[in-house]
Image (spheres, grey):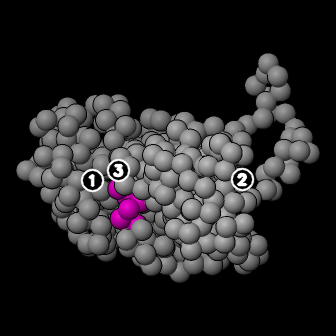
Amino acid sequence: MARLAFPFLNSVRCPIYTPYYRSGGSVPRELSLAEVFQLGYYWETKILLTAVKLDVFSLLDGQGRSAAELAKQLGADTRALELLLNALVAIRLLAKNETVYANTLVAQTHLVKHGPQYVGHLLLLHDAEWDNWGKLEEAIKTGRSPVSRHVFETDPALGANVLSVLHRIGQQSGPDLAKRLGLGQARTMLDLGGGAGTNAIAFCRVYPTLSATVFDLATTLPLTERTVKEAGLEGRIALKSGDFNRDSLEGPYDVVLMSDILHYQNLATNAALVKKIHAHLNPGGRLVIKDRFLDASGTSPAWTAAFAVHILVNTEQGGCYRTAEAMQWMHDGGYTSVEEIERTAVVQGFKPQAE
């Protein structure tokens, strides 16, 4: 299955995930009572998600409308809709001139459907997961997730739309990772659970002599095929469907990339997969694991600590793991020169030249 990790959120300053520091220092300060209350308010979140679900921003594409006009188009109650619109003005997603509402620049750019930078599908994913969050207390008490199937399995169309958005966003970070790894001598690559082929495309563009295989579920590969063709790389990127935990990975490969896979699987499954990959590498080949890792304390990075709770309530058996755990799986699987090359984000290990 293609996986999600929302790498673009690294650059987003969200009050929930941004540490509160004492003025002029690096030591986190205590939260104020007002900030505690702010953390408990979900109102703005649901206002935004509801507006996206109703597609309010698309109805305001390039033109202003009154609440009555919008209500007529949506089949909504005018008074109730006006309350929603006024709240959207207050949180700076809409502007209001007397009785006429219009998109702000950020809403026009990112929340109008069919726009080239539309991210609404990601927000619709959060809305689809909303009910699961209501079962967090149950999950904490029982230690069991309230879900048995990921939303991508129950709503494949939403999954494909989300992957398209992530592909567009991921094109910014993929080349940087490829360059950092220094794969000039590699000729074959396996992008495991590669989704839309974002990383495979980026790596092949950085390294002209590299050929890649994207391995993912059959339901995902039509999207992959489209993005690979759009990139003009169908001659260098092959597609393979299957379950990477059960099916042969073929190969051998010079490099295998596991990007944002681990947090959707349990510890034993991940350890077995890391060991399995070792047999599909050429001597001297490397496994690169990119994921949302926690530090030794389990409390940092802040976004990942919260993401771990998200994984608890929205996956059947996933989890966020510490960097040391992933590195131990590599050691146990026979890899050498195991190292963390980007803090709480990327680790790698090599198959020995001769065994």
Q: What residue span does the magenta drawing correspond to?
A: 159-164
Magenta segment: does it hold 163?
yes
At 69% from the left and 38% from the top, the residue drawn is 18
| Mark earlier in primary sequence (2, 1) | 2
At 35% from the left and 33% from the top, the residue drawn is 176
Question: How many angstroms separate mark 2 from mark 1 (CA)?
Answer: 39 Å
The residue labelled by disc 3 is 167
Query: In this image, 149 relative to 180: left or right?
Result: right
**Tag 1, which secondary structure?**
loop
Query: In this image, 320 relative to 333: left or right?
Result: right
At 44% from the left and 35% from the top, the residue drawn is 341
The residue labelled by disc 1 is 197
- Identify the image quadrant of the N terminus: bottom left
Residue 323 can be seen, yes or no: no
**Tag 3, which secondary structure?**
helix
Magenta segment: does it hold 172?
no
Q: What amino acid is at disc 3?
A: His
The residue labelled by disc 2 is 87
Residue 349: mark: none
Can you give x and y, in whole percent of width and height, for residue 297 in the image?
Answer: 69, 46
Mark 1, residues whose alpha carbon is within 10 Å: few (<14), some, or many (≥20)? Answer: many
Furthest residue toward left: 235
| Mark earlier in primary sequence (1, 3) | 3
Question: Is the stretch drawn in magenta largely helix, strand or loop?
Answer: helix
| Mark earlier in primary sequence (3, 2) | 2
Can you give x and y, in whole percent of width and height, for residue 161 in the image?
Answer: 38, 62
At 56% from the left and 46% from the top, the residue drawn is 102
Can you give x and y, in whole percent of width and height, for residue 138 in the image?
Answer: 74, 77
**Corner quadrant of residue 306:** bottom right
Q: Is 30 situated above or below 166?
A: above
